[in-house]
C-alpha cells in the first residue's frame, strides 16, 4: 500500500476547508472499511496524498428523534443503527438494512455517510492494480464500459446508460423508502438533496470539497408497516444481488400508501411509482402483490447475463410486501 | 455435534494411553496466542522485498522487456528475467516438466511469470513494477478444452500437439461383455468448475545464501520436494539446500508445486547477496492457481436388475490451464479410484487433459476425485431411480468389501463402505425422509474415500517414504521427535507426538516435535495424498519402539524383583517388562517399576545419547498398468455422507440444513482432529457445490480473485454436522490408522447435489449449483411439463 498522510479534523467546517485547500489531493476517511480497500488495491488512477479523518469530530454519530422525524449524524455506525430503539421503532427498514451489511466487525466500523459514498462493486472497476494494472473504464474517465459486453451478471437493470454498475448500498434502499434527505456541507455553505437525487449514473451529488453533514428522515405515515429484504448468494458478508424494501399503510384492509424500493438494480436505489399506484386503493391479495412486482420490473433492461436478477427482484418485492402485511420479519 | 461412536469396534484403542484420545494440539497455544511464527512474521536485517513481474496478456510472444526505467528507481536492487536464471524446466510430473522460472519466449496466461524485482521495501517494489515495459506480439488464445481441441487452434506448447497435455486410455475386464450382461444402461454427462483452495496465507519465500548453501524458508506442503526441486533447478546438491517451513497457513494441495516465490527468492538472493522475501498478494494466489481442474464428465454404466454394476465407461475432459504441475496425476486420479469404491470388473476409462491459456490447475483436497465423485454419485442416483431402487441400497449392493483386489490391481485391506452406508442411513433418518419430504426439501447421499498416501515418490527414487528419529534428553525427562512431516493445520504434529508417546510409553506432555526443517529433521515427503498419519506415523512408531526396546534392556539391569513373596527372584529379562506413560514396570507385577527418566539417564551415562530410529517404505504395491502409481496405496479410506437441503423454489437458493458423515478411517488417533477434518470438508464441499467458481473475462483476466467475489461459506452458512466413525482397523497402518483429510471432501459434492435433485426434481448438471442455475432448472422443467401437458 502506498503511503499517505493521515490528518485528524475536529469540525465539519475544518474538514471542508482542508478539502478545499488541498486542491483535490485530500479525501475523507470515516470508518475506512471501503476506502482502505480501494486504496490498497489501487483501483483508481488518482491516489490521495491526504486522508482526512472525520472520526475525530466529536458528536457526529448521533441518532436523534425530533418532531419532524429522525436525524442521523454522518458518523453513526451501522451497528448503532441496527440496534437503536428509535430506528427500530419507526424506521424498521433502515435497522434491517443496516443489520444486513457485512459482518459485525464491518458494522462496528462502517458509518452511514461512508456507506452512501462507497465505491461501486463492479468487478471490472475493482480489478486490483497489482495484477497487470487496473482496468480503466468509463466510470474511471477513460475508455468504455467493460461490463456491458463482458460478465455483467451483477450489473444494473434500470437507468444505466454508459456505465452499468449497480449501487451496492443497502442502507440507501431503506433511506429512499423512507424519503430521507441528505444535508451536504461545502465551501459555499449547506444544501439539502433528496436521497433519490443523491446518486448519479457515474457517482453522486457531492461536488469536490463537499461532505455529508447529516441525514434527515421524515416521520413515516401513521400505521406504516415496512420491510427490507436482501438476496445474497452467501448468507453473511455478502453484497446484495438485489435488495428490496416496501412500506405499506392500510385503512380497513385497503392500501392507502405503498412504497417499493429496490437496491443493486440501478445506479442508485430506485422507487417504482407505477407499481406503487397500482397497489393503492386495493386489497392486497397475493395475486395483487405479484402483479405489482411484475409491473415494477416491466421496464427492466437486462444485459446479457443478469436477466435472473429480474426474477429475484420480483420475488423480493412480493415477499417484502407480504411481510409488511404479516408485519413479521422475513429478514434474510 | 460429534459423537464418539464405536460401531464396528475393530481395534483395541481403549487400551492405549495416547492413541485414540482427544489430546490438546501441540501447537494450540502458539496459534491461539499469535505467538507462533508464520513466514510473514520473519524479518532479517538487510532483507529485500521482491515481487514477480507478471504477464498482462493471456498468450503472447515476448518481444522486449524494458527494465531501464525501473532500474533507475532508487532502492531497486535487482531486476531479473529469463536471461538471468537457469533455463531448465521444472514441474511435478517428471514426464511433463514444462515450466520455466520465467517465461523464455511466450507467456501462456494472464499473470504468467516474466521476471522479478527486489528492492529495499515493498513500496519501491510496487513502484518499480509499474515502470517495467513489456512489448508483446499477441497470439490467439484458448480458454476452454473445447477451444483448445478445435482444428487449427493456437498451439500453446510445441510438445503438446492439439494442446493435449495428458491422454489416458485404460480398460480393465471386458466392457463389451458387461454391455451384453446389462439389464439397464444409462449415460449421464455432468461438469465441474474450476475452484481454488482458499487458504488465507498467500505464498511467500525468504531465501538467503551462506557460501555455497542456500537457506529457503517457504510456505509449502513438503520440505523434501522443495529441496529436491530447488537443487535440481539451480544445479546444486540437495545437501546444499536447506529448506525450513515456519507454520504454514493452510495448503489443501495449493502449496505442493514449486511456486514462483521459491525460484525467484533463490535467484534474487544469489544475485544480491542479501536475504530476499518474495511475496504474493492475495489475488496472486488465484493467478498461481493449482486448484481444482474444470472437468466435463461422461459416464455410461450398465447394471443388473438388482442394481449390480456390470460395466462402467468413463470419459473425463480436464481444463488444465497453462502448465502440467500435478495435472498428470490429477488426470489419472479422476478415474483410478472408482473401482476401489465400487466393486465391478469391467471398466473403461478415457481422459484428456488440455492446456489452456488460464492459470494452471493442480491438486486440491481430494485430488482429482471430488468432481468425478460428484458426477458418478449423481449418475448412480439416476440409475437407482430408473430401477426403482433406494439410492443407498444401490450403493450397498456395489460397495467394495475388505480384503479384495480391484480390477486395476489395487489391494484393499480394510474397507467398510457398506457399514458406513448403513449407519449413515440410520442416523440421518433417511428412511423417514427419502421420498417423503415436501417439495423444496430433499435428502441425498454420496460415497467417497481416498488413498492413504501415494505408493510412490513423485519422482523416480529408491528413498524411503518416511524416516523418524527420536532423541531423549540427557537426563531422560524430555523427548524430541524429528520428522519432515508438514503440519499445514491438519494436526499432523499432534498425532505424531501422540504416536511417539504411545510407542515409547512416554508422557505426551514431555515431547517436542522438530519438523519442517531439512537440516534438523529426518526425511518425509510431506503433506499430500493424505499420507502423514500412516506414513510418518509408521516411521515415528518404529523410532519410538526402538527407544522402548533400548529402555527395556537398560531397565532389566536396573529393576530388582523382591526376593520374598515377589514375582520371582533372579535377573529380569526385557521381555518381562513394559513401559507406559513414563514408567517401566514388570508386566506380571506392575508395582515393581522405575521411571523412564531414570532408566534413560542411566542409558546416557553408559552409552551416550539415546536415539530411536524408524524407517518406512510401503514396499511393492498392487497395480501394473500405465499410471498404476496414481491410486496404489497401502490403505484406502471410505466414507458415506448424507445432506439434507432446503431449496427456495422461487429464487433457487439452497440452504444445507443437516449433514451426516460416517467414516471408515481405521483407528482414529485423535477423534477431535478427525471431526475437524470432516467439518472442514463439508464447508469446502458445500462451497464448491453451491457458490465457488473462479471466473475469467473473455480475455482470460481473473475477475474474482478475492474472498468477496469468490464466495466460500462462512460459519453462518454451515449446517449442523454429525460426524461418526466406524472405528475400523487397517492392517497396513500403524495402530490400524487410515486417512481422513482428503477423502472427506470426496463425497460432499455428490451428496449435496443429490439432495438438491431430491428437493427440486430436476438435475442441474453443471457445478456450482447457484441459485440462478437451480432456478433455471426449475423453470425449464416447468416449461417441459407444460409442453407435455399440451
Ligand atoms: C466485506 C464487506 C462487506 C460489505 N457488505 C456490504 C453490504 O452488504 N451492504 C452494503 O451496503 N455495504 C457493504 N459493505 C460496504 C460498507 O457498508 C461500506 O464499506 C461502509 O459503509 C463504508 O463506511 P465507512 O465509514 O467505513 O467509509 P469509508 O471507507 O471511510 O469511506 C467510504 C467513502 O465514503 C467517503 N465518505 C465517508 N464519510 C463521508 C462523509 N461524511 N461525507 C462525504 N464522504 C464521505 C470517503 O471519502 C470514501 O470515499 C461491505 C464492505 C465490506 C468490506
Ligand atoms: S459498469 Fe461502470 S464501473 Fe463497471 S466497467 Fe462499466 S463503466 Fe466501468
Image: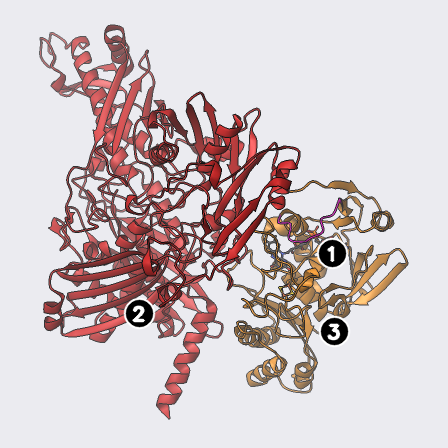
**Magenta segment range?**
A41-50
3 or 1: mark nearer the eye: 1
* Residue under the image location 17 percent in, 39 percent down: B732
The red one among the chains is B
Q: Secondary structure at mark 2?
A: strand
Q: How far apart are labels 2 and 1 at the CA level?
A: 51 Å
Crowd rating for badge 3 (residues with CA inside 10 Å; few <14, some 14–19, many 20+): few
In the figure, the shade used to draw chain A is orange
- For disc 2, the chain is B
Say if the magenta span includes residue A139: no
> Do callouts 3 and 1 point to residues on the same chain?
yes
Residue carrying label 2 = B189
Residue A92 shows in this picture = no
Q: Secondary structure at mark 1?
A: helix
Crowd rating for badge 1 (residues with CA inside 10 Å; few <14, some 14–19, many 20+): many
Residue A259: give x, y in percent of width and height: 69, 76
Residue B172 shows in this picture = yes
**Circle on res. A194:** none
Residue B648: give x, y in percent of width and height: 46, 71
**Total numbered labels:** 3
Residue carrying label 3 = A222
Question: In front here: B121 or B357?
Answer: B357
Q: Tell which circle, 3 or 1, labels the residue nearer the N-terminal end.
A: 1
Residue carrying label 1 = A113
Label 2–label 3 contact, CB within 8 A: no
Amino acid at each position: 500500500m502506498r503511503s499517505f498522510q493521515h490528518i485528524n479534523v475536529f469540525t465539519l467546517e475544518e474538514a471542508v476547508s482542508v478539502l478545499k485547500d488541498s486542491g483535490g489531493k485530500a479525501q475523507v476517511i470515516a470508518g475506512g472499511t471501503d476506502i482502505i480497500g480501494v486504496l490498497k488495491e489501487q483501483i483508481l488512477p488518482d491516489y490521495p496524498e491526504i486522508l482526512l479523518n472525520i472520526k475525530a469530530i466529536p458528536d457526529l454519530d448521533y441518532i436523534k428523534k425530533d418532531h419532524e422525524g429522525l436525524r442521523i449524524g454522518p458518523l453513526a455506525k451501522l451497528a448503532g443503527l441496527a440496534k437503536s430503539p428509535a430506528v427500530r421503532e419507526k424506521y424498521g427498514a433502515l435497522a434491517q438494512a443496516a443489520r444486513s451489511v457485512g459482518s459485525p466487525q464491518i458494522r462496528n466500523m462502517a458509518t452511514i455517510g461512508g456507506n452512501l459514498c462507497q465505491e461501486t462493486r463492479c468487478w471490472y472497476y475493482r480489478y486490483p492494480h497489482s495484477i497487470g494494472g487496473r482496468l480503466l473504464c468509463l466510470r474511471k474517465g477513460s475508455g468504455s464500459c467493460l461490463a456491458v459486453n463482458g460478465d455483467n451478471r451483477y450489473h444494473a437493470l434500470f437507468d444505466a446508460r454508459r456505465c452499468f454498475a449497480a449501487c451496492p448500498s443497502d442502507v440507501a434502499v431503506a433511506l429512499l423508502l423512507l424519503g430521507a434527505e441528505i444535508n451536504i456541507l461545502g465551501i459555499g455553505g449547506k444544501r439539502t438533496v433528496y436521497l433519490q437525487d443523491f446518486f448519479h449514473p457515474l457517482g453522486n451529488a457531492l461536488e469536490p470539497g463537499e461532505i455529508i453533514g447529516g441525514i434527515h428522515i421524515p416521520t413515516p405515515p401513521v400505521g406504516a408497516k415496512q420491510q427490507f429484504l436482501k438476496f445474497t448468494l452467501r448468507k453473511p458478508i455478502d453484497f446484495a444481488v438485489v435488495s428490496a424494501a416496501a412500506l405499506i399503510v392500510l385503512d380497513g384492509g385497503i392500501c392507502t400508501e405503498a412504497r417499493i424500493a429496490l437496491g443493486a438494480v440501478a445506479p442508485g436505489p430506485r422507487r417504482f411509482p407505477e407499481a406503487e399506484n397500482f397497489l393503492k386503493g386495493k386489497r392486497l391479495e397475493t395475486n395483487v402483490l405479484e402483479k405489482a412486482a411484475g409491473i415494477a420490473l416491466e421496464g427492466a433492461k437486462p444485459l446479457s447475463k443478469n436477466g435472473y436478477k429480474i426474477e429475484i427482484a420480483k420475488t423480493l418485492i412480493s415477499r417484502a410486501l407480504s411481510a409488511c402485511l404479516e408485519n413479521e420479519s422475513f429478514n434474510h | 455435534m460429534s459423537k464418539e461412536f464405536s460401531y464396528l469396534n475393530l481395534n483395541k484403542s481403549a487400551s492405549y494411553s495416547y492413541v485414540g484420545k482427544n489430546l490438546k494440539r501441540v501447537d494450540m497455544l502458539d496459534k491461539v496466542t499469535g505467538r507462533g511464527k508464520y513466514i510473514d512474521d520473519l524479518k532479517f536485517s538487510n532483507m529485500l522485498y521482491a515481487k514477480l513481474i507478471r504477464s498482462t496478456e493471456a498468450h503472447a510472444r515476448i518481444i522486449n522487456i524494458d527494465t531501464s526505467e525501473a532500474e533507475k528507481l532508487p532502492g531497486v536492487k535487482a531486476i531479473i528475467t529469463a536471461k538471468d536464471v537457469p533455463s531448465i524446466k521444472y514441474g511435478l510430473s517428471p514426464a511433463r516438466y514444462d515450466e520455466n522460472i520465467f517465461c523464455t519466449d511466450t507467456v501462456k496466461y494472464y499473470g504468467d511469470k516474466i521476471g522479478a524485482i527486489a528492492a529495499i521495501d515493498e513500496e519501491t517494489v510496487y513502484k518499480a513494477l509499474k515502470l517495467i515495459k513489456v512489448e508483446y506480439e499477441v497470439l490467439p488464445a484458448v480458454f476452454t478444452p473445447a477451444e483448445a481441441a478445435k482444428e487449427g487452434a493456437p498451439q500453446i506448447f510445441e510438445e503438446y500437439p492439439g494442446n493435449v497435455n495428458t491422454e489416458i486410455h485404460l480398460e480393465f475386464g471386458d466392457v463389451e461383455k458387461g454391455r451384453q450382461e446389462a439389464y439397464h444402461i444409462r449415460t449421464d454427462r455432468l461438469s465441474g468448475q474450476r475452484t481454488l483452495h482458499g487458504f488465507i496465507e498467500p505464498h511467500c519465500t525468504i531465501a538467503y545464501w551462506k557460501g555455497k548453501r542456500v537457506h529457503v524458508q517457504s510456505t509449502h506442503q513438503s520440505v523434501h520436494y522443495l529441496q529436491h526441486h530447488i537443487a535440481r533447478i539451480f544445479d546444486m546438491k540437495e545437501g546444499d539446500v536447506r529448506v525450513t517451513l515456519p507454520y504454514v497457513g493452510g495448503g489443501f494441495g495449493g502449496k505442493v508445486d514449486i511456486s514462483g516465490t521459491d525460484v525467484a527468492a533463490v535467484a534474487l538472493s544469489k544475485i544480491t547477496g542479501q536475504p530476499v522475501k518474495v511475496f504474493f498478494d492475495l489475488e496472486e494466489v488465484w493467478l498461481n492457481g493449482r486448484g481444482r481442474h474444470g472437468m466435463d464428465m461422461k459416464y455410461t454404466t450398465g447394471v443388473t436388475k438388482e442394481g449390480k454394476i456390470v460395466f462402467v465407461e468413463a470419459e473425463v475432459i480436464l481444463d488444465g490451464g497453462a502448465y502440467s504441475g500435478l495435472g498428470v496425476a490429477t488426470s489419472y486420479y479422476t478415474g483410478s479410484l472408482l473401482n476401489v469404491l465400487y466393486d465391478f470388473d469391467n471398466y473403461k476409462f478415457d481422459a484428456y487433459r488440455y492446456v489452456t491459456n488460464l492459470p494452471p490447475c493442480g491438486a486440491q483436497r481430494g485430488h482429482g476425485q471430488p468432481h468425478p465423485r460428484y458426477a458418478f454419485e449423481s449418475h448412480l442416483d439416476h440409475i437407482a431411480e430408473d430401477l426403482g431402487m433406494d439410492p443407498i441400497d444401490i450403493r450397498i449392493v456395489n460397495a467394495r468389501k475388505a480384503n479384495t483386489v480391484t480390477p486395476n490391481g489395487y489391494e484393499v485391506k480394510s474397507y467398510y463402505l457398506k457399514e458406513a452406508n448403513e449407519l449413515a442411513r440410520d442416523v440421518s433418518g433417511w428412511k423417514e425422509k427419502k421420498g417423503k419430504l415436501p417439495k423444496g426439501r430433499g435428502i441425498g447421499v454420496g460415497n467417497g474415500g481416498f488413498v492413504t498416501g501415494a505408493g510412490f515418490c513423485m519422482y523416480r527414487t529408491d528413498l524411503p517414504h518416511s524416516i523418524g528419529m527420536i532423541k531423549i534428553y540427557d537426563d531422560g525427562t524430555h523427548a524430541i521427535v524429528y520428522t519432515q512431516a508438514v503440519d499445514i493445520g491438519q494436526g499432523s504434529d499432534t498425532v505424531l507426538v501422540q504416536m511417539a508417546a504411545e510407542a515409547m510409553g512416554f508422557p505426551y506432555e514431555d515431547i517436542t516435535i522438530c519438523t519442517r526443517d531439512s537440516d534438523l529433521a529426518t526425511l518425509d515427503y510431506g503433506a499430500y495424498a493424505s499420507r502423514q498419519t500412516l506414513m510418518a506415523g509408521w516411521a515415528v512408531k518404529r523410532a519410538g519402539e526402538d527407544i522402548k526396546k533400548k529402555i527395556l534392556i537398560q531397565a532389566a539391569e536396573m529393576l530388582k524383583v523382591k526376593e520374598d513373596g515377589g514375582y520371582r527372584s533372579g535377573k529380569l529379562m526385557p521381555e518381562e517388562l513394559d513401559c507406559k506413560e513414563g514408567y517401566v514396570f514388570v508386566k506380571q507385577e506392575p508395582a515393581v517399576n522405575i521411571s523412564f527418566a531414570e532408566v534413560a539417564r542411566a542409558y546416557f551415562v553408559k552409552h551416550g545419547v539415546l536415539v530411536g530410529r524408524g524407517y518406512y517404505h510401503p514396499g511393492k504395491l498392487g497395480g501394473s498398468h500405465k499410471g498404476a502409481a496414481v491410486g496404489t496405496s497401502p490403505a484406502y479410506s471410505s466414507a458415506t455422507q448424507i445432506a439434507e437441503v432446503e431449496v427456495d423454489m422461487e429464487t433457487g437458493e439452497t440452504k444445507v440444513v443437516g449433514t451426516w458423515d460416517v467414516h471408515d478411517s481405521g483407528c482414529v488417533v485423535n477423534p477431535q482432529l478427525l471431526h475437524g477434518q470432516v467439518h472442514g470438508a463439508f464447508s469446502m464441499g458445500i462451497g464448491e457445490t453451491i457458490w465457488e467458481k473462479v471466473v475469467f473475462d473473455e480475455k482470460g483476466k481473473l475477475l474474482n480473485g478475492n474472498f468477496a467475489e469468490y464466495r466460500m461459506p462462512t460459519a453462518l452458512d454451515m449446517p449442523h454436522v454429525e460426524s461418526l466413525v466406524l472405528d475400523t482397523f487397517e492392517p497396513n497402518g500403524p495402530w490400524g490408522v487410515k486417512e481422513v483429510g482428503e477423502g472427506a471432501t470426496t463425497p460432499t459434492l455428490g451428496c449435496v447435489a443429490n439432495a438438491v435433485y431430491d428437493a427440486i426434481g430436476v438435475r442441474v448438471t453443471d457445478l456450482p449449483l447457484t441459485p440462478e442455475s437451480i432456478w433455471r432448472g426449475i423453470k425449464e422443467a416447468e416449461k417441459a411439463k407444460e409442453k407435455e401437458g399440451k
